[in-house]
Amino acid sequence: MNMRATGDLDQIDDLDWSVRTAVYSFITEQMRPPTVDEAAALLGVPRERAALAFQRLNQRHALFLEPGTLTIRMAHPFSGIPTPFTVQVNGRAYFANCAWDMLGIPAALHADAEIEAHYADAANTAVTLTVRDGEVHGHDEVVHFPLPFQRWYDDLVRT
Amino acid sequence: MLFRSEEEINAWCERTGQPRGETLTLAQTWELAQRWYHDRLRPDFRGRTPDEAQRIFQQLGLTSPAWSLKPADESSCR
């Protein structure tokens, strides 16, 4: 991957934000993040420009790339890889990054959802939760946030 | 991380050596998710400033140091 000078990555412009919008639109339709080539095609820009946008957005934590690549790992609340949290909304199935994001997906989409989640201490135990008419329905589960908010970006995968 | 109870969180932390952090109920987490993500898909979304994030936490009664965005030494003086 061609890494730009740090100064370039610290800048951001309307086109970069348009790439962000396109990424999220793609995810909601296709249930996965676009590749950089797909993003370039959507915006009608050269691949290199889309790649720069990915890197700038990553720099600002607007999305998160796999280190050293142009592959989108997270565009919160959506995960780019399979996780223990599958969220079904309007006939589509998404992966959420965590227990917070499994509720973040219906919140972002303003829609009801059926969620299949796994407990952290019992990975083989699946549970179904629902969001319906603005309310969440579960089984008295609790959500644990192991790190203080200040440290969430230290290691977002672990958080 | 999703658990069935506070007791199971405690047991998991003891077993794994992971730190014991903050816990929210499912309803609290849903409320937080709505306030945090309701505008995420808007084309004009530009992220949240620390003050905006702090306000969201405070509105939900999340005021412990774990939810503070101030440096640890500053918050401990309060």
Image (cartoon, rainbow, N blue to C red):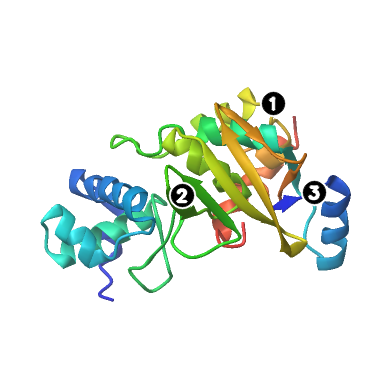
Instruction: Determine if residue A154 is in view.
Output: yes
Using the image as rendered, state which of residue A8 and residue A159 is in the foreground.
A159
Q: Amino acid at mark 1?
A: Gly
Q: Is residue A11 left or right of residue A139?
A: left
**x 82%, y 59%: residue:** B13
Label 3 and label 1: CA atoms lie apart by: 23 Å
**x 60%, y 47%: residue:** A150
Label 2 and label 3: CA atoms lie apart by: 24 Å
Q: Amino acid at mark 3?
A: Arg
In the picture, the disc for residue A76 is 2
Looking at the image, is B24 positioned above or below residue A75? above
Label 1 and label 2: CA atoms lie apart by: 23 Å
Instruction: Tell me where residue B14 appears, x and y as whole percent.
Output: 87, 62
Q: Residues within 10 Å of mark 1 (few under 14, many from 20)?
A: few
Q: Is residue A92 left or right of residue B59?
A: left
User: Which chain is disc 3 placed on?
Assistant: B
Q: Amino acid at mark 2?
A: His
Residue most extreme to the front: A91
The nearer-to-camera label among 2 and 3 is 3
Dots 1 and 2: beta carbons under 8 Å? no
**x 75%, y 37%: residue:** B76
Q: Name the residue tied to disc 3.
A: B4
Q: Quadrant of the C terminus of chain A?
A: bottom right
Q: Name the residue tied to disc 1.
A: B61
The nearer-to-camera label among 3 and 1 is 3
Q: Secondary structure at mark 2?
A: loop
Q: Residues within 10 Å of mark 2 (few under 14, many from 20)?
A: many
Q: Quadrant of the N terminus of chain A?
A: bottom left
User: Which chain is disc 2 placed on?
Assistant: A
